Amino acid sequence: MNYRIIAKILSRVMTIEALLMILPVITALIYGESIVCFLLTMLIAGALAYLLSLLKPRRKDLYAREGFVSVSLSWILMSLVGALPFFFSGAIPSYVNAVFETVSGFTTTGATILTNVEAMSRGLLFWRSLTQWIGGMGVLVFIMAVLPLAEEHSMYIMRAEVPGPLVDKLVPHIRSSTTITYLIYICLTAMLVILLCCGGMPVFDSLIHAMSAAGTGGYSIKNLSVGYYDSAYIDIVIGIFVTPKSRTKIPITISIYALS
């Protein structure tokens, strides 16, 4: 087992998670909310990334075994760190519950321990839905789309992250494949935001629900979910975007690209 190459991958994962905190920070600043919880999380993620980067790989080889371990540990580490904003802010006083909420997001499960989601700040609501948006395509698929990895390394990670036979068609140009699928994913999300805005949903609400629908997790910022808007148009639009992915259990963006 090449533990050092796994540490290198985990270091990159933590670097990305630290950078992702910039988005809820911007959201919190726009709405005049505290950003301390996000800055603390960013600091911890950055520190972990630095410590893991100290383990320089002596060998560059990465095979299926390392791929599966990297994916598993990345999910765990991202969830443990991703739960910190909820815990530090006091929005979810129990760290265990905060981890549950975050794991539910990254795995797009959609289960929640919150009884009054509307009491949560906009910055935290954005981060909560962002976890589902990232999880919709797979955490490691996202990492491969934004950070350079050797093609042979990416293949084993991709096989560990994405179910089904469609992965074979994405190899050998795995980096370009993940980039293209994410562009499709972003375009579909943006399209849904526009359609929801056309239905009278506020811009922030549209963005949150679009990310949740794209990832098929279903997180909402209303206690009544989309039922709050009492709009058949909104129900139909979200249903159209969610149904294909929820039926196949495979990201629709990968399916679209693989069939092309």
Image: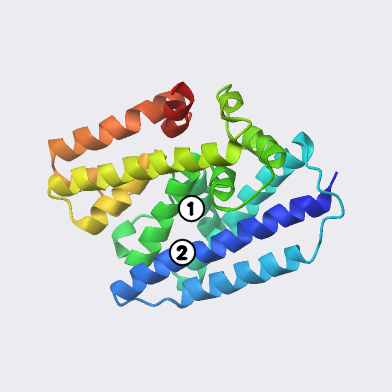
Tag 1: amino acid: Glu
Position of 142 relative to 124 (above/below): above
For disc 1, the neighbor class at 10 Å (few under 14, some 14 to 19, many from 20) is many
Residue 163 falls in which quadrant of the image?
Answer: top right
Name which residue type carries label 2.
Ile
Say left or right for 173 vs 217.
Answer: right
Instruction: Return the residue nearer the eye: 244 or 232.
Output: 244
Residue 96: percent from left, percent from top: 57, 58
Which residue has dot 1 on it?
101
Colouring scheme, one of rainbow, by chain, secondary structure, one colour: rainbow
Distance of label 1 from label 2 (alpha carbons) = 9 Å
Q: The residue tagged with tag 2: helix, strand or loop? A: loop
Q: Report which residue position mark 2 lands on.
A: 92
* Disc 1 and disc 2 in contact, CB within 8 angstroms: yes
First along the sequence among labels 1 and 2: 2
Q: Secondary structure at mark 1?
A: helix
Give whichever of 84, 223 is nearer the camera. Answer: 84
